[in-house]
Amino acid sequence: MSQSISTAQVIDEAGRRRTFAVISHPDAGKSTLTEALALHARAINSAGAVHGKGDRRGVTSDWMELERERGISVTSAALQFGYRERVMNLVDTPGHADFSEDTYRVLSAVDCAIMLVDAAKGLEEQTRKLFAVCRHRGVPVITFINKWDRRGRESLALLDDIQNVLGITPVPQVWPVGPAGNFRGIVQASDTEHMVRYTKEPGGTRVALEEVLDSAQAAEQEGDLWQEALEELELALDSGPGYDQEAFENGKITPVFFGAALTNIGVKLLLDAVVELAPAPGPRPLDGGGSREVTEDFSGVVFKIQANMDPAHRDRIAFVRVCSGVFERGMNVTRAASGRSFATKYASTVFGAERTVVDTAYPGDVVGLINASALRVGDTLYTGRKATFPPLPAFAPEYFAVARPKDISRSKQFRRGVSQLDEEGVVQVLVSDRRGDQAPVMAAVGPMQFDVVLHRMEHEFSSPITLDRLSYKLARVTDPDGQAELAKARLTDAEVLTRRSDDALLALFADKWHLSAFQRAKPDIRLDPLIATA
Ligand code: G4P
């Protein structure tokens, strides 16, 4: 640890950190909520500056052009802001309509997630998948039911869905006064004697005006709506186990908030919940047992690599979540996978197009290491006692395409590009005996990853390619015993055996029917989905 920073200081700084992400289906309001959260924390001057979809400032690269064309956010990493003596790190989850491995992996960098639900649409597909990843990784989840200012579903029905579809018990912390579309205000579960009433300021800012009424005033002014809110809240609380911090941290319950990010209703209470309920960075389990305490020497995990954010510099940024100790710019750290050390001369925080140089970072913080070309997603970095964090899970790809260079004289560029994209985890690259390594199979969790591959191969690696979609839908891995058996197995046209760059054998199947037929014929070969995501 640094000479100048004491253990007590690290404990204090780590205790102040809240590192979280917002998980949601596209259009549920993630950008709007991010702006509203940051507005409360005064990290930005006016809502709309974080990553408004329309007026995007500082569009500086080809990469961002792709981002702008698609209206997606792919370059951000983490937004840091101060709130109530805490340091909040909001880690951005790429919000495109399709899945990519990036979206999942970001969740390895956070200690808590806000699950954002559109009041009218309920639990949408991407929300369910991301929730499954949180559960898999033991990330506690706070629920925010958004857009209550618009017509939507009934509050109790939404809670039933959370219980029945996700299998986690919702415990309301606030209740809306008025149904979706007639949002009068909020009552807190901890204080049913008061209502916070919201009114829109005509023609003014988007932030709704707040007014606290006592229960007599609320009953007089809101009549039945106030009574109904109290009754529904009681019903919702009586049918559940009540709030319990341990149950929350163990993923058994999710505290629920209602609001409208657009008019800033309920956002402050949500932010307060992140401060009060979300766990601070704690000991992190190590590969092979034991854990790394936050007070130990520096350690961190690379959860995202972004190349060419700034084409003028052709740079490549590795985003690291600090897990223990203190990160100081310029320090020498060791990469666990190779045992090699390197100097972290260029370190910055990045959000959207903005960069700020970081000199010191504590557990929970995210730093971007620029031009750390040796780093890979999932890498552990450390000083002092060796640490290796468990590998990030690889997710079962569901989309497959064969890549071929358009110009075979550029095969060197082609190979370099393919291996770079593989290392970055943009796609998984699979090689089949049938096609050989001149025509590798790109495997993706979502089809948008293919757009990224096409774009980057052409513009970054100067090797335009064609991608021909294959009709496989399922990928399965096997254990070491199964590998030899699988290699010998005779496959039909609807099945193919491929090898990933980490040497794992993956069998691809056209559909469930072929998979089960194969399993019936070869019951001894254990086939696993890489992870259950739905
Ligand atoms: P995303 O990042 O999750 O994709 O969602 P985003 O914040 O862009 O929000 C999607 C749409 O939902 C936007 O409208 C946004 O204004 C709206 N929205 C977000 N929160 C609320 C809310 O609390 N209440 C209401 N009524 N609407 C909300 P849009 O018309 O698609 O875009 P824009 O023109 O408003 O930017």
Image (cartoon, rainbow, N blue to C red):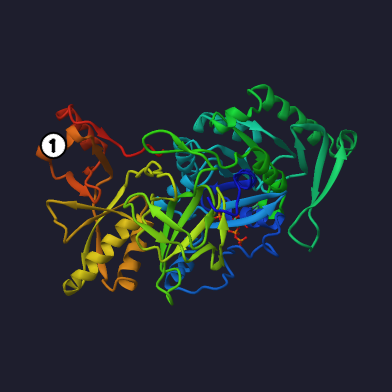
Q: Name the quadrant of the C terminus.
A: top left
- Is 519 placed above or below 440 here? above
Mark 1 is on which residue type? Answer: Ala
Q: Quick check: is the Cβ at mark 1 less than 8 Å away from ligand 1?
A: no
**Which residue position is annotated with label 1?**
484
118 or 330, which lies in front? 330
Residue 465 visible in the shown view: yes
227 or 54, which lies in front? 54
Disc 1 is placed on an element classified as helix
Image coordinates of residue 208 in percent, x first then y, are 77, 53
Image coordinates of residue 474 in percent, x first then y, are 28, 42
Residue 490 visible in the shown view: no
**Residue occupying image coordinates x 77% and y 43%:** 185
Image coordinates of residue 90 in percent, x first then y, are 58, 52
Image coordinates of residue 128 in percent, x first then y, are 48, 40
200 or 392, which lies in front? 392
State the residue lying farthest toward the bottom: 312
Give the quarter of the image for residue 530.
Answer: top left
- Is 511 placed above or below 455 here? above
- Is 238 placed above or below 122 here? above
What number of labels is visible? 1
Label 1, residues with CA under 10 Å away: few <14, some 14-19, many ≥20: few
